[in-house]
Image (cartoon, rainbow, N blue to C red):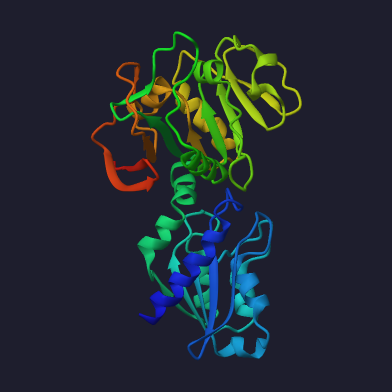
Amino acid sequence: MEKEKYMWRCIELAKNGLSTVSSNPMVGAVIVDNKTIIGEGYHMIPGGPHAEVNAINSVKDKSRLTQSTLYVNLEPCSHFGKTAPCSQLIIDHKIPKVVIGCKDPFREVSGKGIKQLEEAGIEVIIGVLEKECETLNKRFIKNQTHQRPYIILKWAESADGYMDRIRKDGTPAKLSTDLTNMVVHKKRSEASAIMVGTQTALLDNPILNVRNWSGTNPVRVLIDQTLRLPRPLLHLFDKQIQTYVFTAREKKSADNLTFITIDFEKNMLNQIVNEIYKRNLSTLLVEGGSSLHQSFIEANLWDEIHIERSQDTLIRGIPAPKIKGNAVRTEERHFGVNYDIYYNYQS
């Protein structure tokens, strides 16, 4: 149980990087000597010191490292990227034992960090809380194993299963509360990109930023096949946030507004997802309308679904998307009068 206790601490430390380290993994490290934590750290920002570096630097008496155990939830890196290899740093400080939660799926590291430590005579234990460590970095693992962003579909629906009313006056139905709006903006702060379709952009005129939570604005992604949206009138074209517009027409990009031409006669979603991945955006949050969500569901191109269920009824309107059999309901969270239902994709 001692190993699990310190690995849980690594996981808790790593979570501090949820909104800041994308597209890198979340990593926490703990250094223990004689059942006492003498150092700890986590990865804070891309390009910054890794968790192991911060943990080692936090140890006041470096001589204790030679009799300590380093715990880390992800295999230490063994290659030169934006920072030097952590495996070599561990070797240089003569730390005799390393406990690792799970292997790193990144091909430049996978297994190599462990091998380097073992060849240096360090005792390495692998797989402590392995499932929990993999769940922590499920977004990063999806990026590395499937070469695409981790995709979250998020929508709000009424108690009777509608996303919106039939709009005669052009006014959208308000299903979210002030509290659930904060939750949505927290989700946005944890995503690299946020996506809507043409109709949502036209009818709702969303800003798609993080304003009811503290965090970085995700890149905005918009589908506008024929470039029919009135750009001067919509927030999405204000150039305040990096915005990608997927279209069938050629259009010159400017400032924070990038037009990406794709072939709408072929698989539109795959092309968009591939372009997002190529731009190093690790998590895509989809907040579009029913049709866009249903397209992702039918294509089996999603990882999580978050449904906000309102207590209000609309009687008639635009039906919410239909979830298929590969969706596994995992939990339910209540936020005042509304509640969220979470599903995971099961292949």
311 relative position to 265: left or right: left
28 relative position to 57: left or right: left
Depth check: give the residue in front, 9 or 276: 9
Q: Quadrant of the N terminus?
A: bottom left
Residue 148 visible: no
Residue 207 in the image: state x and y as whole percent: 61, 28
Give the residue displayed 43% in from the left and 70% down from the top: 8
Residue 206 in the image: state x and y as whole percent: 57, 25
Give the residue displayed 63% in from the left and 66% down from the top: 85
176 over 250 or under it: above or below: below
Q: Quadrant of the C terminus?
A: top left
Residue 28 in the image: state x and y as whole percent: 54, 67
Give the residue displayed 42% in from the left and 62% down from the top: 133
Residue 17 in the image: state x and y as whole percent: 57, 57
Depth check: give the residue in front, 23 or 84: 23
* Outermost right residue: 255
**In this figure, what is the number of numbered marks?**
0
282 over 239 or under it: above or below: below
Residue 155 visible: yes
271 relative position to 159: left or right: right
Depth check: give the residue in front, 36 or 263: 36
